[in-house]
Image (tube, rainbow, N blue to C red):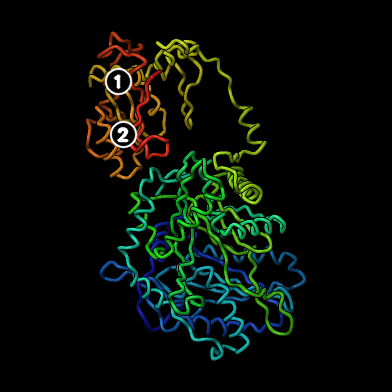
Amino acid sequence: MTSSGLEDILPLSPMQEGLLFHSRYEQDGADVYAVQHVFDLRGALDGDRLRTAVDALVQRHANLRAGFREVGSGRTVQTIARHVEVPWKEVDLSAPTASGADEELDRLAAREHSHRFDLAEPPLLRFLLARLGEEHHRLIMTTHHILLDGWSTPILVRELTALYESQGDPAELPRVTPYSQFLGWLAQQDQAAAEAAWREAYAGLERATLIGPTDPGRAGRMPERIVLELDEDRTAALADRARRDGVTLNSVLQAAWGLVLSRRTGQNDVVFGAVVAGRNPQLTGVESMVGLLIAMIPVRVALDPAQSLLSTVLRIQEEQSALTAHHHLGLARIQRLAGYNELFDTSLVFENYPWGEDPADRSGPGLRIAPDLSRGRDATHYPLTLIAAPGRRLHLRLDYRDDIVDRAEAQSYLDSLIRVLDLFTADAGRSVGRIDLLTHEERTTLLKHATTHTTPDTTNSSSTLPELFEAQAARTPHAPAITHNNTTLTYAQLNTQSNQLAHHLITTHHIGPEDTIAIALPRTPDLITAILATLKTGAAYLPLDPQHPTHRLTHILTTAQPTLTLTTTDTHLPHHTTTLHIDHPTTHHHLNQQPTHNPTNHHRTTPLTPHHPAYLIHTSGSTGHPKGVVTTHRN
């Protein structure tokens, strides 16, 4: 591919900056933002004439000739070549002996898709025309998402058809609204107002919503996918219910996906990404503009168990509508305003593109170009991406990275989503807290694997939690107490480790009843050991999530004023207390010197009773308590 001359230099949109980052950073695996569209062509076709139409189409839209280069200041710009040579291939798969034409076409398409684009070298699109029969062809367009969004595709198809019929003459087409006008409009928006709106929208968020482990070095990988469609009756009933209640299908899907994530993560306040069109009606001609106008924004779904499903949908729609004017702010900036590097790792795409009349249904002479959605390739870098497309049948597709989520788990996400959609149709007034998303099979599996334990008599109010645990450890010393990944601790092992840590806290740090220990540890056996050890000293524990924003951690530590914080060497916390790094070699050395027997009141700084505090939870008000610290006693 070659280009000649320079026509223009343009800035990047926030979405383009994000895609450029992923494509440059994830060089070891697949470029998941390489997109492939497959079009079914019916009618007599002149290949040279179609290639002329493609060249005219690329010449017509300057941003299709863009390359992305870093300038001397370190900033990346898109350079628009005056002319580019568009890569074009033709293959004939129509021979009678070519019984595997579809399989061969799939192989060729996969090879085209796997060939990475150099984003600095335009054009970032190429074409393959396959002849399948006398009047049957397929056109495969492989491009990079940094050039185009889904809304642009129907526009390109309509223009390509017109240019084919006019032999490449654009005179009959309407005047182009250049993509550069959108970039100029972005630069004029009120950044301060947008930042204030997003900051307010994410105030009080206590946790990111992540279904997979955070791994910045994870290589790109094309996802597996599960596709299904609601039948026409269920689709019509869902659309009718949404219309009668004054909500969009997109809002229903957002609420449903939020509820599914809530059930899967155990969080009542969840966040996921959503793709928005970004085509502000204030910009003249934006509906026919070709380019990347979409944006990825976070959607927050805070669930109130007492609120009905319908009320939840209405509230989400209202909250998202209030943020529409601020969609132009980049995702990276929004996440920083919320206090997180990564707010979510699942996304929702609602595809409602302006295809209009189905080209395949047209009668009369001429070339008919229709998208073959079953053969296209597109993806994101997230572990889960839900794609929904309305129509007579609601089309649902769940893309999943099978190195993070297996097929059975992905299917269960989709099954849960369908149950919420059906429930919205049948009983939208049901309270969120009464919605059960377990299938009969899942409930049976849980019950089958549940273990019945005989619990000790706790009616004696003098029993403390450490004593109850120690009694269980004495009864079943070799029974597994904790299983985590490939690690299993028996009751005896857990009791011994927590005893050693408790003795260290008592003798070295003088921890005892009425003291508070903050615990900022990942969800590993060390967390359970630390909680038990704290309780054995007689102190109360205060759980901290290191992923919370710094300002929130500072507020909690300032309010609770713990005596000591247990954490790890790679966890960064505000410096408000004395800190003990339990993974430090010196700590390990001291712990190994401690006795293994159960601490008693003889060892503690003061006697422990059931009336001493056991733990402190800092609430946001959702528990029914006022905002602040809730203290729970041992009885």
Residue at the image position 28 percent from the left and 13 percent from the top: 604
Question: Is residue 634 positioned above or below 74 on the image?
Answer: above
Q: Can you name the residue that lies furthest to the right here?
A: 96
Q: Hey, what amino acid is under mark 2?
A: Thr
Q: Which mark is residue 591?
A: 1
Left-right relation of 427 to 266: right
Instruction: Tell me which numbered mark, 2 or 1, is placed earlier along the sequence.
Output: 2
**Residue toward you, 49 or 327:** 327
Quadrant in the picture for the C terminus: top left
Left-right relation of 227 to 460: right
**Residue toward you, 330 or 459:** 459
The picture places residue 149, in percent across and down from the top left corner, at 50, 68
**Residue toward you, 621 or 408:** 621
> What element does badge 1 sit on?
helix
Question: Is residue 548 positioned above or below 489 on the image?
Answer: below
Residue at the image position 53 percent from the left and 41 percent from the top: 263
Q: Which mark is residue 230?
A: none
Residue at the image position 48 percent from the left and 27 percent from the top: 483
The picture places residue 42, in percent across and down from the top left corner, at 70, 77
**Residue toward you, 338 or 423:** 423
Q: Counting other residues with Cα less than 10 Å from the Cα at mark 2, is it few (<14), some (14-19), or many (20 or more)?
A: some
> What element does badge 2 sit on?
loop
Give the labeled residue for mark 2.
568
Is mark 2 in CB contact (under 8 Å) with mark 1?
A: no
Q: Hey, what amino acid is under mark 1?
A: Leu
Question: Is residue 51 positioned above or below 278 on the image?
Answer: below
Number of residue marks: 2
